[in-house]
Amino acid sequence: MSAKRILVVDDAKILCVGLERILRQQGYTVECAPDGQSAVSRVLEQEFHMVLIDLIMPGLDGVEACRQIKRARPQTVVVLMTGRVDEELEQREQDFQKAGGYPRCLHKPFDAEEVLAIIRATIAA
C-alpha cells in the first residue's frame, strides 16, 4: 500500500518545514503550499488524503480554500490550524466546519502528537 499523502498549507515556511519533517518520519508523503490558492491548485492536480491548512493567509483564507477543496475532492480530510485567539475565531471555526472541514481545530503552537493523533483517527489504515 502506498503512503498516505498530506498537504501542509501555511504562509509560515518554518511551520511547513517542521511538519513536513515530522510527517515524513512517520511514513507519510508530504507536500507544502504557501497559501490557499496554491493548495486548491495542488488538490485539483493530485489527490491528497489530508490537508492541514492555516486559517489566515494571503489570498484565499483557510475557510474558502476548504470550500473549494471539498467541492473538488469531498473525500479529502481538511484540518484547520490557527494561532489566532479572538472573539471572531469561534465563528470562523464554525464556517470552516460548514465548508466540510474537520471539526477539531489545531491551535498553534501544537505538538507533533496532537497532529499525529488526528491523522491516525481520520486517514490512517
Image: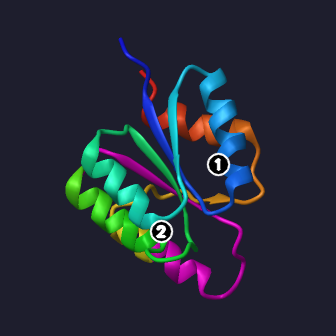
In the picture provided, is 44 more to the left or to the right than 27? left
Observer-side mark, 2 or 1, equals 1
Mark 1 Cα shell of 10 Å, populated few (<14), some (14-19), many (≥20): many
What residue did someone put label 1 on?
A: 16
Q: Which mark is residue 45?
A: none
Callout 2: helix, strand or loop? helix
Name of the residue lying farthest toward the bottom:
87
Distance between mark 2 and mark 1 Cα atoms: 15 Å
Residue 16 at x, y percent in the picture: 64, 48
- Which region of the structure is painted magenta? 74-94
Q: Residue 19 appears at what percent x and percent y?
A: 66, 41
Name the residue type under label 2: Gly
Q: Quadrant of residue 83?
A: bottom right
> For numbered disc 1, what is the local secondary structure?
helix
Q: Which residue shows up at 33% across the image and 45% down it?
A: 76
Question: Please, which colouring scheme is shown?
Answer: rainbow
Q: Place residue 13 in its image quadrant.
A: bottom right
Label 2–label 1 contact, CB within 8 A? no
Task: Name the residue at 43% across, 27% down.
Answer: 4
